[in-house]
Amino acid sequence: MRDVRLEGIVKQFGKVRAVDGIDLHIRENEFLVFLGPSGCGKTTTLRCIAGLETLDEGRILIGGRDVTHLPPGKRGIGMVFQSYALFPHMTVAANIGFGLRVKGVDRTEIDRRVRRAAELLQLGNLLDRYPSQLSGGQRQRVAVARAVVVEPQVLLMDEPLSNLDALLRLSMRAEIKRLQQEIQATTVYVTHDQVEALSLGDRIAVMSEGKIVQLDEPQEVYDNPATVFVGAFIGNPPMNFLTGRVRQDAGRLFLEGEGYQVPLSPEAAARIQAARIDEVTIGIRPENIAVSLTEPEGGGIAASVIVSELIGAQRMLTLALGPHTLKVTTSTEFLPPPNGQVWLTFDPAKIRLFDAATQARLAQLPKAS
Ligand SMILES: Nc1ncnc2c1ncn2[C@@H]1O[C@H](COP(=O)(O)OP(=O)(O)O)[C@@H](O)[C@H]1O
Ligand SMILES: [Mg+2]
């Protein structure tokens, strides 16, 4: 087994609890992504797994073995840092093989494994070059090859693509995914880039202030954020939020706030009622709001267009709904009228409900039997 278990780990720097009690089971061969804003504790958590930080509390098990007090070299890990820090006076081959030489692996074995790692990362014809003779993307590949060559049980990567330009990031992202599938190492990957997290992760652990706020598969994190924070952090543009109170009108239920009322499904109303809260925050993604030029038959929500932007395959509208601002994506063919007046329909099945006070998602109601 090459799984990783974090049990109540805490790492404190003075008064800052960089890692504030994390419990997590990373499965064998899983690609797990830590996602969160800068300063939320991603790097520190990864460094704890690597053994580069000593824990204040908790323990870490790799493959069932308690490694809490083991030095990095004895943990069976390979690590790729954000700054790839290659040795400038060593060739690509020597850089990749460095870790094996330190361990005293014999020369023919080093040679074989360096060639294999170089092949995996398409560096085969660059082995005699020096880092200064490589492009940014090639250097990053050398850094990954150096981590892979030790055949780690667990591969740890800290924002490995953040120093590359956008196009290169895209191609390296696909390569990392392919590589991981090929070498089958349990992988922990740190990023603040939500697109990277969604595309790479088998599961995503969303972090905020030293804690994991949601641990789920990418689709679930995107569709059903556990908190307002997660919905706002993931998605480009992020989820829209409106806070209001539930009101009944002619047998229909609405969320009513300043300048709008949004129809709610009976199921949503029941959940709000079961939660016994006064104020509800609803979340809805920009692609789940339909926009039309005339009022739809079932009634719509009037809004006015502030900005209309072409963003490639879609158009993004910034809308005013009373004092609130919403982002909606539509087809590029949708052209807002000169007076800016449009009508919105929220897909009721896509409305997400949060407690306005705690910002946490409202619990699902148990299914009626
Ligand atoms: N060596 C250190 N000394 C003091 N504070 C640190 C140290 N490393 C990290 N921190 C603090 O711990 C928190 C988490 O940092 P970090 O793990 O680097 O976050 P992230 O990688 O998510 O951006 C931040 O508040 C940071 O300032
Ligand atoms: Mg970091």
Image (spheres, helix red, strand yellow):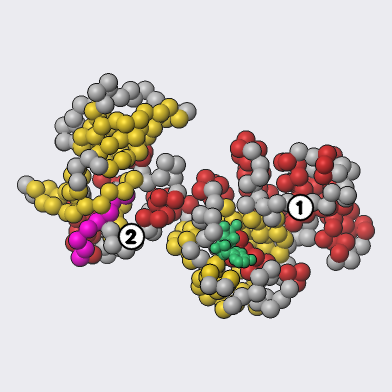
Q: State which image quarter holds ligand 2.
A: bottom right
Q: Is residue 71 left or right of residue 275?
A: right
Find residue 326 and report its horizontal and vertical position in percent. 32, 40
**Residue 52's image quarter?**
bottom right
Find residue 99 and report its horizontal and vertical position in percent. 82, 60
Specify the quadrant that holds the N terminus: bottom right
Specify the quadrant that holds the C terminus: bottom left
* Magenta segment includes 280: yes
Q: Please say whether residue 122 is visible from this viewpoint.
A: no
**Residue 166's image quarter?**
top right
Circle 1 Cα neighbour tier, 10 Å, few/some/many (<14 / 14–19 / ≥20): few
Q: The disc labelled 2 sits on which kind of residue?
A: Gln
Which numbered circle lies on residue 208? none
Q: Secondary structure at mark 2?
A: loop
Q: Please say whether residue 210 is visible from this viewpoint.
A: yes
Q: Is residue 62 left or right of residue 286?
A: right
- Total tally of numbered discs in the picture: 2
Find residue 285 and report its horizontal and vertical position in percent. 36, 44
Residue 6, compared with residue 355, is above or below; it is: below
Q: Secondary structure at mark 1?
A: loop
Give the residue pinned by disc 2.
359
* Magenta segment includes 55: no
Q: Is residue 139 left or right of residue 185?
A: right
**What residue appears at the point 52 percent right and 60 percent down from the top-left corner?**
40
Q: The disc labelled 1 sits on which kind of residue?
A: Ala
Give the residue pinned by disc 1.
85
Give the Cα distance between marks 2 and 1. Answer: 41 Å
Instruction: Please report the bounds of the magenta region as a residue range.
Output: 276-283
Q: Residue furthest right?
A: 107
Q: Residue furthest top?
A: 338
Residue 127, compared with residue 246, is above or below; it is: above
